[in-house]
């Protein structure tokens, strides 16, 4: 399931915790696809804390608590990391990350917590949702087969990498538009994880997470071309890093973006790779203009330019990314109707 759909499901599951209909959710997927980030975004949207518990780093006693004697009885000290209304609030997200990397003795200690929302005398507050995430056994990570009793305590969702969802996140997160354009042009490199290749010694590989690292590398080494290729390869692997560096070098041929935003007559590029890069750059500029006095003027000029792109599909991609970035304000622009009419005619007679 794509990230946008999973976000909607997790939102509903969070809200259902108070209603008494919550089912713990297990997210399955390879490393680096953004499972933890999707959960964190749910907590952020609702303005509640997220307690991230890494079960792979724990002993059973860490979760169950430490016993102590009270008269002739033994009681258990509740671990401070578990949700507590006084310390954390009435609502929140309890996130059990790396659950498939936890030893069986630890996952067994989590059975009661996950299904019954309690451990001994401790109870998870009603307003807290329980989410978990882990890698599959074929992903070459440290993982154990999930025991059937534990698996039966979750609803299970497979995390799917989706380029449109990643691009929307990337624009919002301020990821360099050139990397967005590159992955629009080479979508197969957004995620290219081969467990066999990884076991053969290549540690870096392309994932949504490692492309964020590539963004940081570009910021740090852009003015050091002798280091940039190696820095990108260190983040996303040799093949993807070298290809991305070559792409970045070719962008010197891009037309003047500032002139496009001013509404000047700028000839669009004929090369497909440059059209991808230009469309991503203009979508990023549309997002940056949001809230400024010149926003409508800038957006209108971008829509006018979208009509001029040689490949109509490129204009559709540009306007779709603009819509993800600025929302329904796009439809109120007079240039939008002209663009839509042009695209409709092109598709009708294609």
Image (cartoon, rainbow, N blue to C red):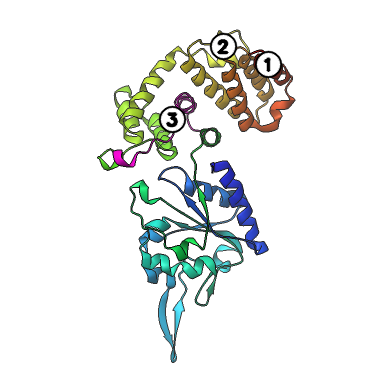
Tell me if mark 1 has few (under 14), some (14-19) or many (20+) residues whose alpha carbon lies within 10 angstroms of its own. few
- The Cα atoms of the two marked residues, 1 and 2, are separated by 17 Å
Asked if the magenta segment contains residue 248, the reply would be: no
At a point 42% along the width and 58% down the height, the residue shown is: 99
* Residue marked by disc 1: 348
Q: Is residue 113 placed above or below 221 in the rendered structure? A: below
Question: Which is nearer the N-term, disc 2 or disc 3?
Answer: 3
Q: Is residue 225 left or right of residue 40?
A: left
Residue 23, image x and y in percent? 58, 60
* Residue marked by disc 2: 310
Q: Is residue 339 left or right of residue 261?
A: right
Question: Which is nearer the N-term, disc 1 or disc 2?
Answer: 2
Residue 120, image x and y in percent? 49, 76
Q: Is residue 156 left or right of residue 54?
A: right
Q: Is residue 96 placed above or below 320 in the rendered structure? A: below
Quadrant that contains the C terminus: top right
Q: Is residue 272 left or right of residue 92?
A: left
């Amino acid at each position: 399931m794509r990230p946008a759909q999973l976000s909607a499901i997790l939102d509903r599951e969070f809200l259902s915790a108070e209603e008494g209909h919550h089912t713990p959710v297990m997210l399955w997927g390879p490393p680096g696809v953004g499972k933890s980030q999707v959960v964190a975004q749910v907590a952020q949207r609702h303005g509640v804390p997220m307690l991230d518990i890494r079960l792979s780093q724990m002993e059973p006693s860490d979760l169950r608590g430490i016993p102590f004697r009270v008269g002739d009885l033994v009681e258990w000290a509740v671990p401070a990391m578990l949700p507590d209304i006084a310390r954390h609030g009435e609502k929140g997200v309890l996130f059990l990350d790396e659950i498939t990397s936890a030893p069986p003795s630890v996952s067994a200690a989590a059975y009661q917590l996950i299904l019954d929302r309690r451990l001994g005398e401790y109870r998870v507050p009603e307003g807290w949702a329980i989410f978990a995430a882990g890698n599959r056994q074929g992903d070459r990570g440290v993982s154990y087969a999930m025991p059937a009793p534990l698996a039966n305590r979750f609803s299970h969702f497979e995390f799917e990498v989706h380029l449109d969802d990643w691009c929307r996140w990337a624009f919002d997160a301020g990821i360099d538009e050139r990397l967005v354009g590159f992955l629009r042009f080479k979508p197969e490199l957004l995620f290219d994880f081969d467990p066999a290749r990884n076991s053969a010694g290549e540690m870096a590989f392309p994932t949504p997470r490692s492309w964020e690292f590539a963004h940081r590398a570009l910021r740090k080494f852009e003015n050091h071309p002798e280091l940039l290729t190696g820095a990108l390869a260190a983040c996303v692997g040799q093949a993807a890093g070298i290809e991305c560096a070559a792409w970045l070098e070719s962008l010197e041929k891009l037309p003047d973006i500032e002139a496009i935003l001013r509404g000047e007559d700028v000839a669009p590029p004929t090369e497909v790779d440059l059209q991808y890069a230009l469309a991503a750059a203009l979508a990023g500029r549309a997002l940056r203009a949001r809230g400024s006095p010149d926003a409508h003027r800038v957006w209108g000029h971008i829509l006018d330019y979208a009509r001029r792109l040689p490949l109509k599909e490129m204009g559709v991609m540009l306007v779709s990314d603009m819509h993800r970035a600025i929302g329904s304000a796009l439809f109120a622009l007079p240039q939008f109707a002209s663009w839509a009419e042009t695209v409709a005619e092109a598709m009708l007679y294609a």
